[in-house]
């Protein structure tokens, strides 16, 4: 048997397995919170497989009502072992949007934030579109 063909078949099989493994990644947007005067977006990433998975990036835009208040822009690789991993991402704030949010917080209003974006893991892009209360 040709060793070159065996190598090609093995690489193709690995690529297919890795792609199907990555498609099993689950994620659950969890919350927005204020930590040390910074807005943090948290999500649970669940790797139900025995194969480590890699998140390549997370991007999103955060709204308070119809006002864009910031963005999530995370481009460092994250390696996920089997099980659930809690991921926290800082929100890069836009000054104008935070002004109204600060007023709402001071007046005791419930703050509901909306994130629209993507998580890219192993070359597969997963959408994020979630409304969460500020905790």
Image (tube, rainbow, N blue to C red):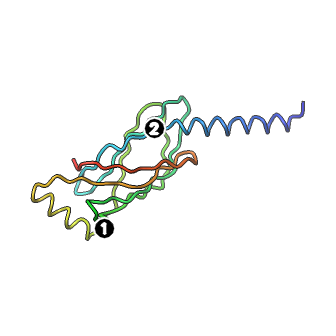
Across and down, in percent, residue 5 comes to: 84, 37
Residue at the far right in the pictured view: 1
Across and down, in percent, residue 18 comes to: 62, 38
The image's mark for residue 94 is 1
Across and down, in percent, residue 23 comes to: 55, 39
Q: Is residue 130 left or right of residue 12?
A: left
Residue position for label 2: 26
Q: Residue at x 30, y 67 (%)?
A: 94
Labels 1 and 2 touching (C-beta < 8 A):
no
Q: How far apart are labels 1 and 2 at the CA level? A: 30 Å
The image's mark for residue 54 is none
Q: Residue at x 46, y 52 (%)?
A: 118
Q: Residues within 10 Å of mark 1 (few under 14, many from 20)?
A: few
- Quadrant location of residue 117? bottom left
Q: What kind of element bears circle 1?
A: loop
Across and down, in percent, residue 22 comes to: 56, 39
């Amino acid at each position: 048997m040709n060793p070159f063909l065996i190598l090609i078949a093995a690489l193709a099989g690995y690529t297919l397995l890795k792609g199907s493994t990555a498609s099993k990644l689950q994620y659950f947007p969890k919350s927005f919170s204020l930590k040390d005067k910074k807005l943090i977006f948290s999500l649970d990433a669940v790797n139900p497989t025995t194969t480590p998975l890699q998140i390549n990036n997370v991007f999103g835009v955060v709204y308070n009502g119809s006002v864009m208040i910031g963005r999530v822009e995370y481009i460092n690789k994250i390696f996920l072992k089997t099980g659930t991993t809690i991921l926290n991402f800082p929100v890069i704030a836009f000054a104008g949007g935070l002004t109204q949010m600060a007023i709402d917080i001071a007046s005791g209003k419930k703050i509901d934030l909306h994130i629209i974006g993507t998580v890219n893991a192993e070359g597969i892009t997963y959408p994020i579109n979630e409304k969460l209360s500020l905790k």
